[in-house]
Amino acid sequence: MQTPFHTVGLVGKYDKPEMHDSVCVLAEFLQTRGHSVLLASQTAERLKLHNCPTRSLHDLATESDVVVVIGGDGTMLSIARELAPHGVPLIGINQGHLGFLTDITVEDMFDAVAEILSGQYVAEERILLNGQVRRGGEKVFEATAFNDVVLGKGGSGRLIDLEISINSEFVYSQRADGLVVTTPTGTTAYALSAGGPIVHPTLEAVVLVPICPHTLSARPIVVSSHSRIELHLTYADDARVHFDGQHYFDLHSGDHVWITRANRPITLLHPHSYSYYDTLRQKLHWGKKL
């Protein structure tokens, strides 16, 4: 068949039994359309699927023309970080809760996936963040985030003291529960709950959102995604830095967290009728046109 997406990789969240049927029927649907289908090894093993060849995530990314992720936004966050260095585009099918990243419903997945694989799609490039923890001048931890890097208080519950610099220029200090450094994609996640703005996901920007700052004049700021953001933890009884809420590292007073844009973006493919603003109206329960 004439399509740029001959080989399709499939990744499914494997801790829910109902995923078995969704992944299985989608694999069969793709095969009947003439696509070669590869299953992520963990998905096949946990869901006991044996109808397709299996690959590690690394091999899946290198051998597939596109990867379909079935699950919730948490699954997409995890898989996107893993596959970002390979440049393979992703399609998200929502079998979770919100579905900002996995915008296709299971009920619509056959029509939507067929439309995309036939070349009728909207492609969006989404940036990721790379974070380094530096202690005494040495790198002690590094991770990538698709949504956000959050420096916050730990189990003690006491406020922490931060100094924020951008491109080596001091910006401000604050005492707060923490700070969310978010990509445009992540502005509808934790940062939104903390009072941050919604930023269109294709913009090359990063947003810094204070979490319950002691000084009420502290406000979110938006900077270029090409900035280097340095967070200096000047004092904390207990603090941590979280990456997409899925990885974390315990911090000490005096630690620095450097945040920069990751080298490779993620490309998400949506059906041709996709509208980001329609997604916002649905997920945030905004009113319709009068």
Image (cartoon, rainbow, N blue to C red):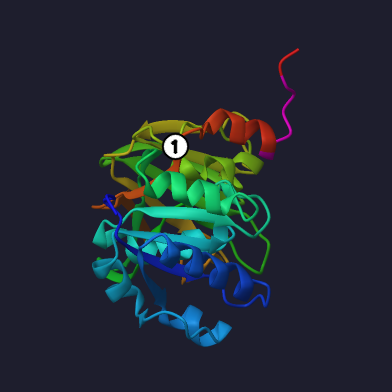
Residue 256 x, y percent position in the rendering: 36, 58
Which residue is denoted by mark 1 in the rendering?
201
Task: Indicate the position of residue 233 as horizontal and vertical percent values.
Answer: 44, 56
| Residue depicted at 25% across the width and 62% down the height | 86
284 part of magenta stretch: yes
Residue 34 occupies quadrant: bottom left
**Magenta residues (range):** 283-288
Residue at image coords 44%, 37%: 201
Camera sees residue 248: no
Whether 203 is drawn above or below 27: the answer is above
Query: Is 80 within the magenta?
Result: no
Q: Quadrant of residue 21?
A: bottom right
- Badge 1 marks a residue whose secondary structure is loop
Determine crowd level at label 1: few under 14, some 14-19, many 20+ residues with C-alpha closer than 10 A. Answer: some
Q: Main secondary structure of the magenta part?
A: loop
Q: Quadrant of the C terminus?
A: top right
Q: Dividing the image into 4 quarters, which one contains the N terminus?
A: bottom left
* Of the pair 218 and 289, the residue shown nearer to us: 289
Q: Is residue 177 visible?
A: yes
Image: 209 above or below 232: above
Which of 30 and 101 lies nearest the eye of the viewer? 30
Residue under the point 65% across and 59% down: 96
x and y percent of residue 60 in the render?
32, 72
Q: Is residue 182 left or right of residue 34?
A: right
| In the image, residue 5 above or below residue 9 | above
Look at label 1 and name its amino acid: Pro
Q: Position of residue 212 (x, y in %)?
A: 65, 44
Judging depth in this view, the residue of 178 and 30 nearest the camera is 30
Q: Residue at x 48, y 62 (%)?
A: 69
**Can you say whether 164 is above or below 7 in the image?**
above
Q: Quadrant of residue 272?
A: top left
